[in-house]
């Protein structure tokens, strides 16, 4: 039995249809939340920084936050564009603590970056990890100091590959409190 | 949650403040922002932030000016400067002013994470250092020397004054009076406290070895010199060198040391290159140095060099008022060490202890109490527990010549001191080497029990 609430996974731009489906399946499988794939949106050209040739993740978040999405509590936007925050060179994904929208981009997660990413199992696993990690922030979770925890900060692909898909027992407890229910779901050993 | 910091982001660009605010919040840190240096200082007055991320270019008060003010008013606050490519020189200036690090924007998220980890570790090390420094000061301060008698109070009063100067100190007094403790107290109260304190018993080291120990040697300097080695005069760098029984140093070594004290340079044995040395000398002797000078054992010029300030440590019999304190101190120490419940000495015992001559001074008292505690069968030590201190006098039958009297007296003293050569030599007022020679000459042997 899943908890109340539903997560909408929305493809933004040209995204292989398998990616949002895999993310939705993992949200249900690992976090025990309902998840559904929403209609795709266009690439957010409004957020393009012409000097950096990257897309401002903050601007995209603000735009999506102001947009109504019916029958879903939280949104995960999936993109294949290079995201940045003004102070950072890039970000794999972005979300704000207790926010409504999170982003994950395939652009820097593919083993061989291209406009049409080759979706190897490794790339898919990375996308799912970033999506679930950012979703954790939407439910108030902070970065965790335990290495074997989904909420541990991963600054590089190597670190991301070492990060598990599970939450540690402390983050699990916090997540349960936030999502309202002591249901069973996957917890790191 | 461990290692969570309080962070303030100071930047006039709201977009930078917001980016960093959300990033730090996601890591669980307490975050606040300020749009100017003035606002940052106002917020610092209200809350002691651990780390400030400060943009170098801001209108009004720039990052460097804010950094200077923060470092002068809140020296424990870590400041990390954020700067753009092209303003590296400002970043270098910031580092010289006291910034812990700088970030060139835009930076990789993992780099920010690394910088945070580094400063967190730095802060932890600083806290650990301050704790250990305080701990060292606690365990080395001179109130671990026990005494409330007038002679000891006079010494306690003078130690801080002596400590702040760099003059050589000569501690005189009988063996076992606590000269090394006084030397350690001088070191602990001196600006050299965080550098080594090295103690050498010159009476226990043969002259040839002492030279190598003090001056060091280079590889091949002598047959056994398989490798180069620094001497204590180099190792002590910045600290205090304590030469115990300085009166036992040979005249040749006195000349060498005199040269070191004058020139502040040494040459390792076998080397031709001199090395600068920096140490404070504290020496001690139980000999009457003036007599030693007259007898030619002690060079007058060396004596004046080591004896800039002289402190006489009184024997226990001259500070018998401290007996109660000392007894309590050693009782507590050895009852804890041996896990035996021995609480006190009887009034009668204390009176007897006060009457005893204590030729070995506080050291002898400490040994006596240790022995009494180890062998004690009740919680209160009685006169019987200290029976070993007053053996019945043995008449010296048929001893007529001076040599026979000397032999008998040495034997008696040795047995009184349990054949402890150091203690017996102290009681007899001769050095250990001389005592060993006399033991051999008279063929003295300890009785097997």
Image (cartoon, grey):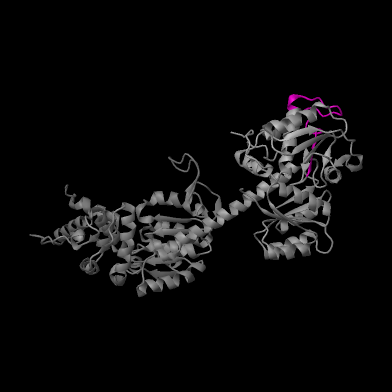
The image shows a total of numbered marks equal to 0
User: From the viewer's perspective, is B83 left or right of B73?
Assistant: right
Locate residue B357, reporting x and y percent: 23, 67
- Decide if residue A21 is in sight here: yes
**Bounds of the magenta span?**
A100-122
Between B193 and B349, the residue placed more toward the observer is: B349
Locate residue B362, reporting x and y percent: 31, 63
User: From the viewer's perspective, is B351 left or right of B163?
Assistant: left
Locate residue B39, reporting x and y percent: 77, 63
Instruction: Assign the magenta stretch its main secondary structure.
Output: loop
Height in image: B151 above or below B34? below
Height in image: A35 above or below B328? above
- Decide if residue A110 is in sight here: no
User: From the viewer's perspective, is B94 left or right of B404?
Assistant: right
Residue sitting at x 44%, y 72% = B158
Residue sitting at x 87%, y 40% = A54
Between B109 and A184, the residue placed more toward the observer is: A184
Among the 4 quarters of the image, the one containing residue B305: bottom left
Locate residue B370, reporting x and y percent: 28, 56
Between A124 and B435, the residue placed more toward the observer is: A124
- Tell me, yes or no, whether the highlighted magenta stretch contains residue A109: yes
- Tell me, yes or no, whether the highlighted magenta stretch contains residue B79: no
């Amino acid at each position: 039995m899943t908890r109340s609430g539903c997560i909408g996974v929305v493809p933004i731009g040209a995204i292989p249809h398998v990616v949002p489906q895999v993310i939705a399946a993992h949200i249900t499988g690992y976090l025990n939340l309902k998840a559904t794939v929403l209609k795709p949106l266009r690439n957010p050209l409004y957020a393009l920084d012409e000097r950096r040739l990257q897309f401002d993740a903050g601007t995209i978040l603000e735009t999506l936050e102001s947009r109504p999405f019916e029958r879903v509590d939280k949104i995960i936007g999936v993109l294949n564009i290079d995201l940045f925050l003004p102070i950072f060179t890039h970000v794999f994904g972005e979300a704000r603590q207790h926010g409504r929208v999170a982003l994950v981009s395939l652009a820097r997660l593919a083993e061989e970056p291209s406009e049409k990413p080759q979706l190897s199992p490794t790339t898919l696993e990375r996308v799912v990890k970033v999506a679930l990690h950012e979703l954790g922030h939407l439910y108030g979770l902070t970065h965790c100091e335990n290495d074997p925890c989904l909420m541990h900060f991963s600054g590089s692909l190597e670190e991301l590959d070492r990060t598990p898909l599970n939450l540690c027992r402390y983050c699990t407890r916090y997540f349960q409190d936030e999502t309202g229910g002591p249901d069973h779901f996957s917890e790191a050993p | 949650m461990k290692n969570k910091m309080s962070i303030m982001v100071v930047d006039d660009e709201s977009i930078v403040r917001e980016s960093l605010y959300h990033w730090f919040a996601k890591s669980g840190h307490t975050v606040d922002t300020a749009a100017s240096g003035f606002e940052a200082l106002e917020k610092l007055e209200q809350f002691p932030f651990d780390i400030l991320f400060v943009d170098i270019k801001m209108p009004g008060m720039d990052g460097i000016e804010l950094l200077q003010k923060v470092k002068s008013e809140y020296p424990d606050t870590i400041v990390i400067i954020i700067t753009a490519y092209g303003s590296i020189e400002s970043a270098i200036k910031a580092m010289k002013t006291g910034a812990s690090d700088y970030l060139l924007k835009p930076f990789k998220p993992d780099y920010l994470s690394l910088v945070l980890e580094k400063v967190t570790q730095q802060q932890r090390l600083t806290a650990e250092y301050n704790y250990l420094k305080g701990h060292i000061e606690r365990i080395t301060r001179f109130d671990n020397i026990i005494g409330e008698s007038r002679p000891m109070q006079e010494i306690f009063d003078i130690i801080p004054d002596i400590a702040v100067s760099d003059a050589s100190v000569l501690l005189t007094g009988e063996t076992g009076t606590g000269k090394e403790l006084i030397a350690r107290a001088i070191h602990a109260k001196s600006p050299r406290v965080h550098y080594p304190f090295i103690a050498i018993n010159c009476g226990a080291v043969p002259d040839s070895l002492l030279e190598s120990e003090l001056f060091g040697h280079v590889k091949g300097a002598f047959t056994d010199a398989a490798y180069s080695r620094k001497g204590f005069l180099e190792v002590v760098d910045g600290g205090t060198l304590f030469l115990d029984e300085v009166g036992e140093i040979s005249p040749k070594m006195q000349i060498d040391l005199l040269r070191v004290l004058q020139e502040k340079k040494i040459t390792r044995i076998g080397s031709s290159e001199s090395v600068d040395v920096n140490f404070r000398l504290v020496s001690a002797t139980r000999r009457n140095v003036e007599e030693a000078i007259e007898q030619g054992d002690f060079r007058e010029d060396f004596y004046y060099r080591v004896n800039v300030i002289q402190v006489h440590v009184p024997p226990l019999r001259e500070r018998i008022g401290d007996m109660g304190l000392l007894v309590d101190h050693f009782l507590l120490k050895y009852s804890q060490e041996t896990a035996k419940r021995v609480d006190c000495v009887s009034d009668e015992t204390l009176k007897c202890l006060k009457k005893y001559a204590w030729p070995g001074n506080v050291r002898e008292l400490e040994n006596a109490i240790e022995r009494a505690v180890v062998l004690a069968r009740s919680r209160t030590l009685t006169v019987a527990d200290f029976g070993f201190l007053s053996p019945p006098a043995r008449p010296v039958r048929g001893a007529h010549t001076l040599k026979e009297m000397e032999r008998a007296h040495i034997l008696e003293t040795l047995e009184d001191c349990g054949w402890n050569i150091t203690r017996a030599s102290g009681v007899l007022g001769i050095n250990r080497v001389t005592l060993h020679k006399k033991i051999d000459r008279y063929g003295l042997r300890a009785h097997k029990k």
